[in-house]
Image (tube, helix red, strand yellow):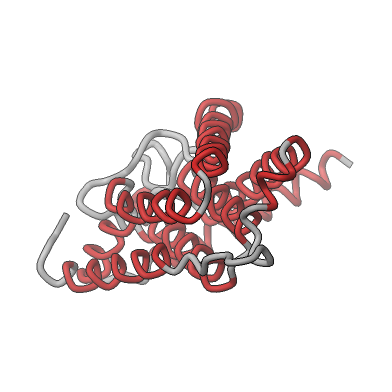
Amino acid sequence: MIDFWLFILYTLISWDTNLTLWINGMYIDYWDNFMELYSGKFIWIPFYVSVAYVIFKHYCWKAALLCIAVAVVLLVINDQISSSVIRHLVRRMRPSNLDNPISHMVHVVDGYRGGRFGFPSAHATNIWGFTFYIIYIFRRHLLSVTMVLWSILVCYSRLYLGVHYLGDLTAGMLLGLFDATVVYFLFKHFMPNVVATFKPNQAGAPGLYLPVFVCWASTAIMLVLAFFIDP
């Protein structure tokens, strides 16, 4: 029985490695620039600010503050579990790490290789946790679709840059989903009236289009900047 499960594990690792190398191997200089920009943490600050702005603009300050405070707690949980706990237990090296036997086959952009371990992806855990939390809280279709597409593209950028396996990103997404689900339902259980104020069936519920615009405008700007800037 142990041999069977070891065989399954090694098969999954082999598939994960081959898929990662195949996807990572499809690159051109322009996309190097774009993916490096898109993968950045600070470049998305306007997007995060736009989310906070519409929350405080359209809802009472107490509900808005609680909503953001819970999001911050979720971020801390996601980041600590992925980066400080699981990574050091699993100790799976990044594809780009020089100690990894496949590192010579990985396309690396501008020498960026990340840290030593990469399972699960903290990027994926954090952004998918945030995405699922926003979907649960607001239930706005356009915002939800935008958040999902944004998360997929950020994860793809990490794969493109060679700093994560596909499995790292998938595990991060699942962890983000699990944590966001638990945190949201605890929030809903203990503060149902606060959570109810954000739902679209409330009278005068706003459309929350600003974050959608900021997200796509930021993406468009990066598509143009990638022609001229090598981060």
Going by the image, does 139 lie left or right of 30? right
Position in image of residue 169 (x %, y %): 53, 52
Reply above or below: 224 against 13. Answer: below
Position in image of residue 191 (x %, y %): 71, 38
Position in image of residue 229 (x %, y %): 12, 62
| Nearer to us in this view, 188 or 180 | 188
Q: In which quarter of the image is the N terminus?
A: top right
Q: Quadrant of the C terminus?
A: bottom left
Going by the image, does 4 lie left or right of 226? right
Tell me which residue sits at (55%, 33%) in the image: 73
Reply above or below: 46 against 28. Answer: above
Position in image of residue 176 (x %, y %): 60, 46
Q: How many labels sit on residues?
A: 0
Tell me which residue sits at (68%, 55%) in the image: 11
| Nearer to us in this view, 20 or 139 | 139
Answer yes or no: is residue 75 visible.
no
Going by the image, does 175 lie left or right of 25? right
Tell me which residue sits at (37%, 46%) in the image: 96
Answer yes or no: is residue 6 visible.
yes
Going by the image, does 92 lie left or right of 186? left
Q: Which of the 4 image quarters holds residue 70?
A: top right
Q: Which of the 4 image quarters holds residue 193?
A: top right
Reply above or below: 113 against 217. Answer: above
Farthest residue toward the right?
1
